Each structure stands twice: as structure tokens, then as C-alpha cells.
Image (tube, helix red, strand yellow):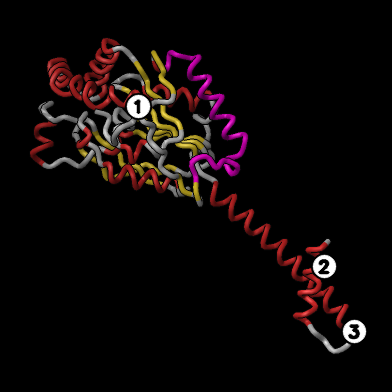
Amino acid sequence: MKKLAHRVGVECRRSAPAEPNQNLSDCMYALTASMAGDSETRLDNQAEKEHVTRQPFLIGVAGGTASGKSSVCGKIMELLGQNKIDHHQRQVAIFSQDSFYKVLTPEQKAKALKGQFNFDHPDAFDNELIMKTMWDIVEGKTVHIPVYDFVTHSRKEETVTVYPADVVLFEGILMFYSQEIRDLFQMKLFVDTDADTRLSRRVLRDINERGRDLEQVLSQYITFVKPAFEEFCLPTKKYADVIIPRGADNSVAINLIVQHIQDIVNGGLTKRLNGCVNGYITPRKRQPSESSSRPH
């Protein structure tokens, strides 16, 4: 009441008409207009706040080659009932780091065709484009994802259009290697599958889907894939919030993750302020065990 009386006094002093009755009338009119204006301002501020803080929940999924990362993402999509929904209406979107391989020079492409190029090294990926794409996702923009041809080792001219979603899964062997990229994820999953299983899957995939022969696949695995996994991928396992043994076969782990995602979507992302300041995700502070931007 004191605040109301004070505001009446302020508005009356602003009006300052000659007649007493007119003074009271003008005061009440000015106060009503002022309160209405404040109410509109509060609504505008609330709407702006909800718009600003609405951020997609970013989930990073890392793991060795053929560990089952894409299968885990696909299973999550399926259990959420999103796999048969039109792309415009989906609440969940999936991206692959494989889409962001750098465009090779003629010399590099010649090596790649012979199985002599290291696609498992951090420098093989276009991290600048990955970062730009991720920030566009954070800002709720429609993004256009490159399409990589693993037979010709080249980036195709066409792109895949992905529309804004509430939950975004980004999978790849080195998704946690760069701190700049790693810190954008609110949840980090590491798919942990034994080496024999990964090798057998890779052999079948590369022969059946990518036109390689067995000798080339094994040579590339021994020369590049296995050493790169041990040097660049495996050390990033420590950054994971959840480690998923056996990949998509681990239904217990995946069901728990799906329940968490459902809580996020059903709870309303506009109320989630975790990691966001003024509508932008702030880099998570490293724990003492996370000594540097690189995991080794």
C-alpha cells in the first residue's frame, strides 16, 4: 500500500492540474495507465525470457569406430517415437561427425582410395564447420548438413536439411576431443564396445557398404584406426556422464537415458536454465581432473 500511495503521489505530481477534482481524476488515470504499462512490460519480459532461454538439449555420443554410436542414437529416437514423424515435427534430431570430414586435396584423395589416409585423426574433421553448425542449432536455426561419400571420399553437392528440435544427438568418434565442442553438450555418452566386436563390424560394413576389400580394411585398421582410437578417442571416455557398455544392446542404460530425455521434453525446455546465460550456453568449468583442452 505504501508503494501504491507513493506511486499515486508521483503520478499526481507529474500531472499537477489546476482543479482539485480534476487532480484526483487525472491521478487515478495516470496510475491506471502506469500499472497497465508495467503489466505489459512484465509480460513482454517474460515472453522474451522464455524465448531466449529455450535451448535444445545437446547430447554428445562418442566411442570407437563401429562401437554402435549411430545404433544407440537410432534406438533413442525409436523409443521416443520420433523415427516415423515428419522432419518438421520431430522433437529429436541426430547428427554425425562423419558428415563433417574435410574436403580432400587430390593428393589426399589418392591416398584415401588406397586406404592410406588417416580418417580417425582429429585433423580429418572440419571442426570450424562443426562449431558453426552447433551454434546455429543452439540458436534454433534450420541447418544444412553436408553429405559425405565414403566410396569416393568426397563431399557431395547436396545437403540434408535439419529443422530445430528440442533434443539434439551428435555422434562421432572424436566428439569429446575438442574442449570447445565438448563443453557445448549438456549430456555426454560414451559407447563402450570391445575391440573384437568393433573390428568385425567395421570389416562387414566397409566391405558391404563402402566397396573395400578385406586386406585394405585390415591394413587401415592396424595402421590408422586402432592407434588413433587409443591416442585420441579412448582418453575422452573420462569426460562421459554415462558409459554404455555393449551399445544398443544395453537396453537398461538406453531406457534410463530415454526417460531423462522425456523428462526434459515434457517438462518444457523454456524453464531450463542449466548452462544458459542470456540465451547462450556457457562453457562448463573443467573439473580438476580435466587438466587441458586435449585428453592426452
x, y percentage for residue 248?
42, 17
x, y percentage for residue 182?
36, 36
Q: Residues within 10 Å of mark 1 (few under 14, many from 20)?
A: many
Q: Which image quadrant is residue 7 in?
A: bottom right
Amino acid under label 3?
Pro
| Dot placed on the residue nearer the N-terminal end, 3 or 2 | 2
Which residue is nearer to you in this view: 167 or 285? 285
Tell me the element at label 3. helix
What residue range appears in magenta?
Answer: 248-276
Q: Is residue 268 magenta?
A: yes
x, y percentage for residue 52?
54, 51
| Dot placed on the residue nearer the N-terminal end, 2 or 1 | 2
Q: What is the spatial separation of the Cα atoms under label 3 and label 2, in whole angstroms?
A: 17 Å
Q: What is the spatial separation of the Cα atoms under label 3 and label 1, in whole angstroms?
A: 75 Å
Amino acid under label 1?
Ala
Tell me the element at label 2. helix
x, y percentage for residue 79?
53, 23
Numbered mark located on residue 113 in the image = none
Q: Which image quadrant is residue 34 in?
A: bottom right
User: Most prominent secondary structure in the magenta stretch?
Assistant: helix
Judging by the rendered image, the residue that carries numbered circle 3 is 20
Q: State whether residue 13 is above or below residue 159.
A: below
Q: State whether residue 288 is above or below residue 229.
A: below
Q: Residues within 10 Å of mark 3 (few under 14, many from 20)?
A: few
Judging by the rendered image, the residue that carries numbered circle 1 is 62
Amino acid under label 2?
Ala
Judging by the rendered image, the residue that carries numbered circle 2 is 5
Which residue is nearer to you in this view: 289 or 130? 289
User: Hey, which residue is sitting farthest right in the picture?
Assistant: 21
Q: What is the spatial separation of the Cα atoms under label 2 and label 1, in whole angstroms?
A: 62 Å
User: Would residue 236 appear left or right of 5 to someone viewing this image?
Assistant: left
Q: Where, quadrant-wise, is the C terminus in this rendering?
A: top left
